[in-house]
Image: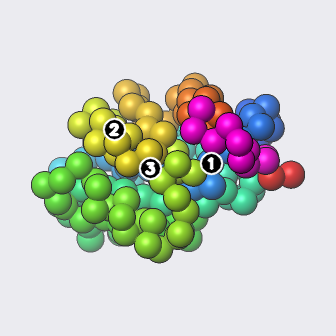
Amino acid sequence: MEELENVRAEAVQMMGVFQVLPKLVVFDLDYTIWPFYCECRSKHDTPSLFPHSRGILTALKDQGIQTAIASKSPTPHIATTFLDKLNITSMFAAKEIFYTSTHKTEHFQKIYSRTGVSYNSMLFFDDDNNNIQEIQKLGVTSILVRNGVNLGIFREGLSRFSQNWDVSNSKNKQKRRK
């Protein structure tokens, strides 16, 4: 519990440094917030998160920033069961968990429909570079995750989002929420 609070506090402090924050942060599941593929597990297993995932999700919630899931898992029932077991289901404004041959474009269209948040106001974390490349084309700031979401990759995402926002919205800057 102490590490959760330390990660949450550091993530909140980190967000305070940036003038511009995303309105929505989207996460892949497998090898992004948790260290396994759902299709290789049973719904009876006990899931775990990468060490910083819960603290970062909690910090985003504390700051009023929405979160969503975009997962191409072929076993959405297992993914949903694991989200419930981890008590994090309610943290997500949208949960798009379904298999598709596209690179999550359909996931993001559905997330946009559910939340109304524009693509350029989103930040996305995924461990699959093909998804990163395709979703960037929509205008979403997309960050490749190599060893799960952690404070370092979160900082990189916030920094890149801020840079992208400055470039594309130099006239109408979104002010950081207080």
Mark 2 Cα within 10 Å, few/some/many (few <14, many 20+)? many
Q: Which residue is mark 2?
A: 132
Is any atom of residue 41 visible in this view? no
Q: Is residue 146 left or right of residue 75?
A: right
Magenta-drawn stretch contains 135: no
Give 169 or 59, whichever is nearer the viewer: 169
Dot 1 amino acid type: Pro
Report if the CB atoms under discs 3 and 2 are less than 8 Å apart. Answer: no
Q: Secondary structure at mark 1?
A: loop
Which residue is under mark 1? 22
| Circle on res. 27 | 3
Disc 3 versus disc 2: nearer the observer: 2
Q: Residue at x 43, y 38 (%)?
A: 142
Q: Which residues are magenta?
A: 167-176
Amino acid type shown at disc 2: Ile
Quick one: SS at disc 3?
strand
